[in-house]
Amino acid sequence: MQFILVSTTLMVLLTIGTGIFMIYKNVEGNRKTLKKILRTNLYVFLPILVAAIITLVPGAINAETTGPAAPSGLGFLAAALSTGLATVGAGYAVAVVGSSALGAVSEDSSILGKTLIFVGLAEGIAIYGLIVSILILGRL
């Protein structure tokens, strides 16, 4: 567990240090090297971060649950993920549909009502995630 914390901290400091070094060195023309270094840091940092979450979160979540009928901390995590991921998906959908709707309305202003329906449908994804989250919390 300490290895994961130390390696995650090391990768964060390495990423920040690389960025500061590149800014200090003023590497404007050598963007290819900067992208390569940041890509390498990202490919190393994300697996370590996932391992840290898998290792540390279940112990922290289940720390306060006591008794035979205590709800599982992973149930709360599932409820949070269903709402969070549905909201991220809805945000992406509204961005794509909204920009397309804006382009369509700029060409023909008579279709404004039709395009608002599509934006509303994209926003409904977040409501579905919230409903699933409420159902999960009801089962705990």
Image (cartoon, rainbow, N blue to C red):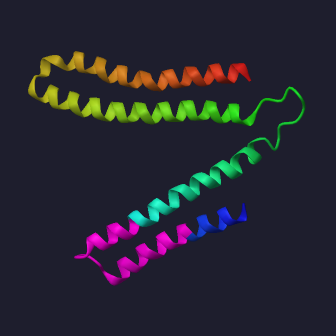
Report the residue at 68% width, 33% height from top: 76
Residue 49 percent location from the top left of the image: 57, 56
Residue stretch in magenta: 11-38
| Residue furthest left as drawn | 107
Q: Which residue is drawn at 33% across and 66% down?
A: 35
Q: How many marks?
A: 0
Q: Which quadrant of the figure contains the N terminus? A: bottom right
The quadrant where residue 104 appears: top left
Residue 63: x, y in percent?
A: 81, 44
- Residue 22 lies in magenta, yes or no? yes
Q: Is residue 115 magenta?
A: no
Position of residue 140 measured from the top left corner of the image (x, y, whole percent): 74, 24
The quarter holding residue 139 reads: top right
Closest to the observer, 73 or 106: 73
**Depicted 100 relative to depicted 50: above or below:** above
Specify the principal SS of the magenta part: helix
Q: In this view, does 96 lie above or below 52?
A: above
State the residue lying farthest toward the bottom. 25
Q: Residue at x 43, y 75 (%)?
A: 18
Q: Is residue 25 left or right of residue 70?
A: left
Front-most of residues 70 and 123: 70
From the viewer's perspective, tell me whether residue 105 is left or right of residue 27.
left
User: At x 47% / y 32%, what residue is drawn?
Assistant: 87
Q: Nearer the viewer, residue 44 or 86?
A: 44
